[in-house]
Image: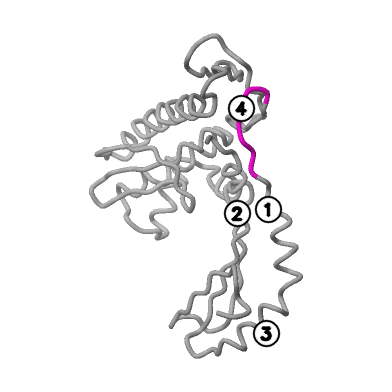
Amino acid sequence: MAGLEGVVVKRSARARRMTLRVSRLDGKVTLTLPRQIRDRVAVDFLKEKAAWVAEAQQSVAPTEQVGIGSELMVEGRRVQVKAGLRRVAMLCDGIVEAPPAKTAAALKTCLEAEARKRCEEHVEHYAAKIGRSANRITMRDPRSRWGSCSSEGNLMFSWRLILAPPEVLDYVVAHEVAHLDQMNHSATFWNLVAELAPEYRRWKAWLGTDGPDLHRYRFD
């Protein structure tokens, strides 16, 4: 669409007005339009919001390629990656050691394994509390969610949760385990989450404000 180059345009029958969203992950701009809005009106709207879009994109944290000497967040603490003698990366007492060769890949493998260990421990603990059990647990690197629960009881978690404060991972696991009992977001569901993670509101809010920053680390 002329005048909207580089903008993801979505038309929706449900949309009652034009809305703009700038992703905190990569600065991508999405313009949602009611179906009846003409292209010219959409272009004018985007021009009016140009300053706001530019400001929002400038606030997006730049990506950081991890490697020897770089810093990254692990369990909510900023740590430096140091060269190790082994072929695998190691996480011990807040220190990260990685091999000089294929550093990023080794780090990703290490962090994903640690995230899986923590998630599995918490799933077992919380599931026992509510008298449920999970079917399968997988670790992935999704861009738009931190966890999910299927109707078959399969749980998925983002391995990047290991980068966040431990309480954040704790909350996400409690959230998804609660779905084993309540496949909805009703008051009953949130009461169950509160029983498992009493301070969940604090860490839910943390994900909303600081969660996108966990995606700035690249492990290419």
User: Which one is in front in this view, the residue at disc 1 or the one at disc 3?
Assistant: 3
Where residue 109 appears, as percent x and y from the top left, is: 45, 27
Distance from the alpha carbon under mark 1 to that under mark 3: 25 Å
Mark 2: amino acid? Asp
Label 4, secondary structure: give it.
Answer: loop
Q: Is residue 178 left or right of residue 70?
A: left
Residue designated by label 1? 60
Magenta segment's dominant SS is: loop
Residue designated by label 2? 26
Tell which circle, 1 or 3, labels the residue nearer the N-terminal end: 3
Where residue 7 appears, as percent x and y from the top left, is: 58, 70
Label 2, secondary structure: give it.
Answer: loop
Where residue 100 appears, as percent x and y from the top left, is: 57, 18
Q: Residues within 10 Å of mark 2 (few under 14, many from 20)?
A: some
Q: Are marks 2 and 1 in contact (CB under 8 Å)?
A: yes
The mark found on residue 44 in the picture is 3
Magenta stretch: includes residue 64: yes
Distance from the alpha carbon under mark 3 to that under mark 4: 44 Å
Position of 53 relative to 127 (above/below): below
Where residue 123 appears, as percent x and y from the top left, is: 36, 35
Distance from the alpha carbon under mark 2 to that under mark 1: 7 Å
Residue designated by label 4? 67
Mark 3: amino acid? Asp
What are the residue bounds of the magenta stretch? 63-69
Label 3, secondary structure: give it.
Answer: helix
